[in-house]
Amino acid sequence: MKPPRKLHIKSYGCQMNVYDAQRMVDTLAGEGFVETASADDADLVILNTCHIREKASEKVYSELGRLRVTKDEAARSGRQMSIAVAGCVAQAEGAEIIRRAPVVDIVVGPQSYHHLPQLLARAEREGRALETEFPVEDKFGFLAQPKPEAIRARGISSFVTVQEGCDKFCTFCVVPYTRGAEVSRPVSKIIDDVTRLADNGVREITLIGQNVNAYHGEGPDGRTWSLGDLLYRLARIPGIVRLRYSTSHPRDVDDTLIAAHRDLPEIMPFVHLPVQSGSDRILAAMNRRHTADEYRRVIDRFRAARQDIAFSSDFIVGFPGETEEDFAATLALVTQIGYAAAYSFKYSPRPGTPAADMQEMASAAEMDGRLERLQGLIDDQQSAFNRAAIGRTVDVLFERPARNPGQIVGRTAYLQPAHVMASSDIIGQILPVTIDSLERYSLLGRLASASEAAQAHSRIAAAQVTTGA
Ligand code: 5AD
Ligand code: SF4
């Protein structure tokens, strides 16, 4: 029997890359590959890249510089190492990658991962292989399913891609070009995936997609189902205790999604809803197709359905033409909404996007100043949100042993890490935890007594009743 070949895969960027990496591992397992934690002893190294901002893109080339040395060392000891570039940089730059970094053997775009075995064979035969087409067949039908042992090893929380690509064409964003047009997977396939995960111990599912609430998949009844319809169905799968979804566009929040938040305790009351800017002028230039007030109204609809809901968002500072007044509108929006968390980025012009041709870039100093002010405000809101948990009893889904011996770590509904001293038997369970303190971003607590738990649950029930659910 041939010894297994070793695969090292490094992902950058979004959650979908994390998910895609797992599917590549599953597909290559069929070719006799096992994962290794280090590039040094790998026979195949895959860089699963991100093109969203220039910094993310450039990381690939510095990593390839390091890998050239590793590959040379492997060759000196008589071992052949192959290097593949996957992900959105592969899609956007194609053959340019091999020109800039001849150490690369394979370039594969996100729609072609199911062809990896053939691409490997072609690279062995011909020295190089490149595929960045958008093939007609659905890659999901061809990517291998994870083995039960692989699901169990990955833990109790899992991503499932339900849609991919985006038709929104925000003027700053490369996604519609790198991930292509919006495509939704059929409901039955998603039910199969979630059922298999649940049967192997997964308790929490995060449905992912670049524009996840644009989901419009074919239902088993022949109708087109929305994300809300899908969530109602998935909540019925035995074993699934928590559902999340990411990333949403404010324009695609429909009444079924709001109703699902009201009706389904499985949907976590924590929604990532990027707004990018609080200025209508900049939102229009970004082609976001909504105003700041329309965004506020979407937030209000969620809050009316579920009083304990919290939000996170993405922001871009220094978009071309952004004035101090526009930026002040962003700060005002953040102050008004009050986020539990948010990510903010300096605008980065991306080749091929409409905004890359816009003039009037803010200076580097202006951008730095705005980013610092916005992040300061967001940090204050996040700290206040985290501190508010102290003294309360909250539900925690336990995930794994923590670094400190004897501690188990899990997450609250708001994705806050929470640590308790307990036996590892609690992994996979949702248990009430009384929070004693906050250490940076982590909550520290203890498993709640029966009376603390009862009080916490009657408070949650009361909150639901007052919203008129
Ligand atoms: N420059 C800076 N940030 C960007 N994002 C997307 N494109 C760019 C860009 N060109 C941010 C947006 C998006 C998040 C994933 O990345 O805020 O929501
Ligand atoms: Fe990019 Fe999101 Fe806009 Fe789509 S909706 S173009 S993924 S920022």
Image: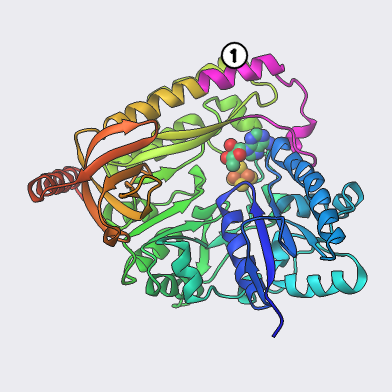
Which residues fall within the magenta stretch? Answer: 345-374
Can you name the residue that lies furthest to the left here? 451
Instruction: Specify whether 300 is left or right of 435.
Output: right
Instruction: Give whichever of 312, 147 is nearer the camera.
Output: 147
- Residue 348 spot, x, y in % from top left: 70, 32
- Residue 406 spot, x, y in % from top left: 30, 50
The image shows residue 25, relative to residue 439, as above or below, that is below
Instruction: Specify whether 455 is left or right of 365.
Output: left
User: Whereabouts is ligand 1, in terms of quadrant?
Assistant: top right
Badge 1 is on which residue? 324
- Residue 273 spot, x, y in % from top left: 47, 41
Instruction: Specify whether 167 is left or right of 194.
Output: right
Colour scheme of the picture: rainbow
Q: Residue at x 55, y 68 (%)?
A: 185
Report which quarter residue 281 is drawn in.
top right
The image shows residue 401, relative to residue 195, as above or below, that is above
Q: Residue at x 63, y 62 (%)?
A: 36
Residue 330 makes an appearance in the image: no
Q: Which quarter of the rendering shows the N terminus? A: bottom right
Secondary structure type for disc 1: helix
- The question of residue 360 being in magenta is answered with yes
Instruction: Give whichever of 366, 328 is nearer the camera.
Output: 366
Which residue type carries mark 1? Glu
- The question of residue 199 being in magenta is answered with no
